[in-house]
Amino acid sequence: MKKFLGPNDADLYGFHGHFHDGRTAVEYYNKKITERREKHSFFIKATEQGDQLKQNGHAKVKDFFNQKQRKVLSNIKSEILNCIDTNTNLKYPSKNMIYIDDPIVNLTSLYEILLDDRIINIAADYYGCLPALGSLAVRKSFVNDSSPMSNQNFHRDYNSMVKNLKFAFYLNDVELDEGETEFLYEKLRVRPRKGL
């Protein structure tokens, strides 16, 4: 039987490839975050969500977007659907999901959400320094009877070795039994609603 790694297991902190070594990953992370804090220090505004992240490992924000920002989200959704309809700027198509290739370049409204001061403040509060975007994925998932694949299954994110922060914005409601996000250690399941 496989053992789930917990936050106190050094092997939880690592990354893909032959460099997978938890202790080395933690040391590397600590060195790099210290350098970033020294190089990119600025006034960090404490946020309620940053406190929740540090205390609970997650934060859910209801009604985060105002009407103007919801219009931007609607524009992003239209841009995604246009890519799919015209079969342009797509990658990894499958029966379960499809990704937008280079979303920062191909979704012109996206930067308005990515550069929102509140998002930057939450990330800065969590990391204790000016944050940097490490990766970005935009995808559309399809409801069907196919077996889950890739990140639709329980998985570990290796794109941040130690302290991973992920923002998820849903452009559609997720109905019961159509998929939800689960945080295993927090024993929390979230059924996403549009705009969260």
Image (cartoon, rainbow, N blue to C red):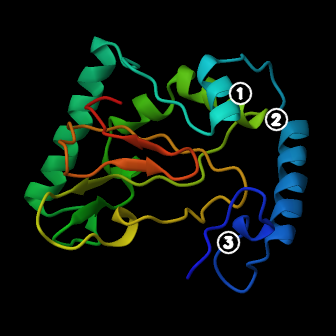
Quarter assignment of residue 73: top left
**Type of the residue with mark 3:** Phe
In this view, the residue farthest toward the bottom is 18
**Type of the residue with mark 1:** Asp
Residue at mark 3: 15
Residue pictured at 90% horizontal, 45% vertical: 34
Q: Are marks 2 and 1 in contact (CB under 8 Å)?
A: no
Against 53, residue 145 (above or below) is below
Against 25, residue 141 (above or below) is above
Left or right relative to 149: residue 146: left
Residue pictured at 55% horizontal, 82% vertical: 1
Mark 3: secondary structure: loop
How far across and down, in percent of the image, does residue 133 sit?
59, 46
Q: Are marks 3 and 2 in contact (CB under 8 Å)?
A: no
Mark 2: secondary structure: loop
72, 154: nearer the viewer: 154
Residue pictured at 63% horizontal, 24% vertical: 121
Left or right relative to 89: residue 95: left
The residues tagged by marks 3 and 2 sit, at their Cα atoms, a distance apart of 25 Å
How far across and down, in percent of the image, does residue 175 sit?
17, 42
Residue at mark 1: 125
**How dense is the environment of label 3, judged by Cα within 10 Å: few (below 14), some, or many (20 and up)?**
some
In this view, the residue farthest toward the left is 85
